[in-house]
Image: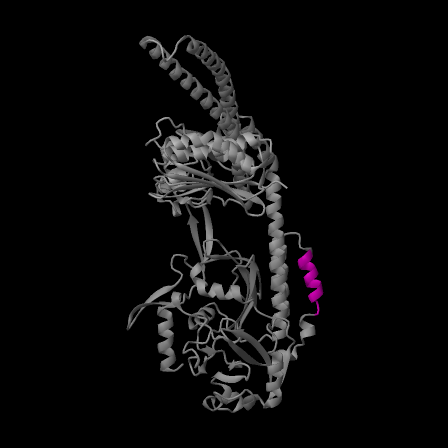
Amino acid sequence: MSQLDKDAFEVLLANCADEPIQFPGAIQPHGLLFNLEEPNLTILQVSANVQSVLGHAPEQVLGKGLEHVLGAGWADVIRSASAHDSFVDAQRLLMTVNGIEFEALMHRNQGVLVLELEIQDKEAQAVSYTERTGNMGRMLRQLHAASDLQTLYEVSVREIQRMTGYDRVLIYRFEEEGHGQVIAEASAPSMELFNGLFFPASDIPEQARELYRRNWLRIIPDADYTPVPLVPQLRPDTQQQLDLSFSTLRSVSPIHCQYMKNMGVLSSMSVSLIQGGKLWGLISCGHRTPLYVSHELRSACQAIGQVLSLQISAMEALEISRQREAKVRTLEQLHQAMADSEENVFDGLAQQPQLLMDLVGATGVAIIEDRQTHCYGICPEVSDIRALHTWMIAGGEPVYASHHLSSVYAPAEAYQPVASGILAMSLPKPVDNGVIWFRSEVKESVQWSGDPNKPLNMESSEGGMRLRPRTSFEIWKVEMTGIAPKWSHGDVFAANDLRRSALENDLARQVRREQQAVRARDELVAVVSHDLRNPMTVISMLCGMMQKSFSSDGPHTSRRISTAIDTMQQAASRMNVLLEDLLDTSKIEAGRYTITPQPLEVSQIFEEAYTLLAPLAMDKSIEISFNAEPDLKVQADPERLFQVLSNLIGNAIKFTPKLGKIGVAAMSNGTEIVFTVRDSGEGIPPEQLPHIFERYWTVKEGNPTGTGLGLYISQGIIKAHGGELGAQSQVGEGSEFRFTVPIAH
C-alpha cells in the first residue's frame, strides 16, 4: 500500500461513522466502470484499470464515445440494451473484448448511465452453474414447506453454502436497538462459530445498512485488493463524486476490509433480507481465501434471499395473527366488563384485574382514573406510577411499549426489579386516565461477539487518538439488567384494541348522557311553555276585559290604570313570543324542526311584509323598498319564511338610524331564490360578526330587549329549507343579510 493510500486509510479510520461509503471514488479491480452520458454514450469517467485491461489510457478515452474502447459493434449492443427504462428484467449480456470475457451490468443514477464490465473468472466458470444450482427447485420447495422460521433459516444457510462453497454462511437479524444477532449458521468444521451471538450496531454502521436496504446483494471477492480510482475523481458535469450506491464493483471501506481480515475471511457476499421496505437482516457469507462467485450464481442466491424475505414476512404475519386470535376471548370479556360498568370504562376494567394482566402476560397493572389509582399484582409505588403516567402523556403516544424502561426514563431505575417493562394506553379525556401494565425485570446472560461496550478500539497515532477495527470476536458474556421480556405484536395489538373499545364505550356513554340531557331539556321546555302559556293567555284576556272598563280619555286615575294594562298586555305578548322561540330553539337543537313547503309567490310575500313592517320604518323616517324579479316562486313554508323576513327586516329597522335606507330584494340564480336585506345602519364590528348566529348572542347597545334567539332560529329555519343564511357588514356603512331557499318548479 502506497503512503498516499496509508494516509487515506488513516483518515477513514478517524471518521468511520461519517464515512460516505457510496462515494468511494474507486472500484474493486475485478472489472471496469464507465460513467456514460446518454444518448451518445460519451465517456465522462472511467476506471483507471482500463489501461491495464484494455490498453487504453484513461485520459485518451474521456469525452469520446464508448465505441472508441469497445468497438462499434459492442457499443451498439450496449446502446440497444440501455434503451429500456429499467434493467431489472434485462437478459444476461456477455461480451469478449481483446480476448477477455466480460459480463455487462448497467444502472442509471442521478442522470447518468453507469456501465460495469465484470471480468469473468474462468476458474469459477469451470464449476457449472447447472451443477451448483441443480437442486434449486428442491430447495425452494423446502423453503416453502418449512413449518417454522428456524427451519426456514437453517435450510437457507445450508443450501447457499452448498451452492457457493463459502466456508461460512449465516443469517444475521437486526434488533430494534440497532445491534444484531446470528440466528442460523452453516460453517466449515474449522471455522469459528458465531451462531446465537450478538454483534454491536457499530459493526454495521447506519450508512452501510442503508446501502444494504437499497441493494439486494453485495460481493467482495478479495478483501486484500488495491482500489482502482475513477478518472477523473469528480464528475465533469457536476464537480461531485459519482454516486456508486447501486454499483456491483463499488470499492468498500478500508475499515470493512480490515474488519473482514480480523474475522479470518478474505472474501464475502451479503444478501439483504427485506421486510416491508425495511432491512430485516442479512445472509452473510465468508471465505478464508479469495473466492469469486459468478453473476449467475449470485442471482440465484439473490432469488433465495427474496423468497426467504417473502417467507419470513408471511410466517411472521401468520404468527402475529395467531397471537391476536389467542387474545380475542379475553378482549371480549374485558369489552363486556366495560360495557356493563355503571360508572365508566375504567371502573369496568378494575373489576377484572386478573383478566387484564393475563391479556398481555403482565406481572402487575395500574388503572388511573382522575385522582384515583388502582394497583393490582406487582407494581411500583403510586407516586412513581403517577409520575410515569405524566411522562408518558407528555410523549403524546396513545399506546406506548418498552421492555427497557430505565433506558428512556431514568427515574425507573429506582424500581426496575418490579417494572422494567411497561405497556400503556390512555384515552383523550380532560382528566388523567389510562392503563399501565408492568413486567418485572428478568436478568439474563447475553453472549456477544466481543465487548459490546467497546466495539471499536482506540489507539494513539501522530494525530492523536483514533478508531481501528476490533480484532477480537471472542465470546463476551454480559448480564443484562433492567430488562423485561419484550412485548409481542399481539400484546401491543391487545392494548390498541382495548383502547379502541374503551373509546367506543366512553363515546357511547357520552352520547347517551347527551341524549338524556336533550330529552330532559325538551320535557322541561314543553312543560314550562305549556304551564306558562295558559296563564299568559288568561292574563291577556283579563287585560282586554279590564281595558274596556277604563278609558285613556277618562279621569287621571283611569288613564294611569289604562297605561298599566297596556304594559301588562305588551309583557304578556312578549312572554308568548319568548316561549315560542324557546320551543323553536329546542326543536332545532334536537334536529326535529319541521317545515311544510309549498309554492309561494315572492311578490305576495313582499306585499304582506310591506304592509306589516312599513309603518315601523315610517315611524323612524326610514325609506324601505322591496324589489323582486317578476314571476318568482319559492318552495317554502309561508309562516316560517315570513318569520325570517320579519326578523331580518325588524333588525334592520331597529339598528338603522332615522332617515336611513333599507332595501329588500329577491332574485334567481337558476336553482335557488336569493333574498337580501340591506340597511344603512352602523354595521357590525368584525370581531362580533362570526358570533351573530350563535344561540343567545345579542348586541346590547340599542337592543335592551333582545334575546339572542332571532338570528339563531332564522338560520335553523333556512337550513330546514336546505338553504344558507349569512351576513356581511362594514362598520359605518351598514349590513347585508343574504339567504337562499329552493325555487318552485
Q: Magenta residues?
A: 134-144
The image shows residue 616 at horizontal and vertical percentages of 41, 30
Q: Is residue 240 left or right of residue 341?
A: left
Q: Position of residue 153 (x, y in %)?
A: 60, 58
Task: Determine whether 64 is above or below 417 in the image.
Answer: below
Look at the image and say whether residue 136 sits in the magenta stretch.
Answer: yes
Q: Report whether residue 100 is seen.
A: no
User: Is the image coloured rainbow, by chain, by secondary structure, or in one colour?
Assistant: one colour
Name the image quarter holding residue 79.
bottom right
Note whether residue 645 is visible.
Answer: yes
Q: Position of residue 463 (x, y in %)?
A: 28, 72
Quadrant of the frame with the N terminus: bottom left
Residue at horizontal 45%, vertical 12%?
544
Q: Nearer the viewer, residue 241 or 565?
A: 565
Say how many tags the image has. 0
Task: Give the quadrant of residue 599.
Answer: top right
Q: Quadrant of the C terminus?
A: top right
Reply yes or no: does residue 64 show up in magenta: no
Question: Which residue sits at x=63%, y=66%?
Answer: 303
589 or 86, which lies in front?
589
The residue positioned farthest toward the front in the image shown: 553
Which is nearer the eye, 594 or 650?
A: 650
Q: Is the magenta stretch mostly helix, strand or loop?
A: helix
Specify the quadrant of the image occupied by residue 539: top left
Q: Position of residue 20 (x, y in %)?
A: 42, 70
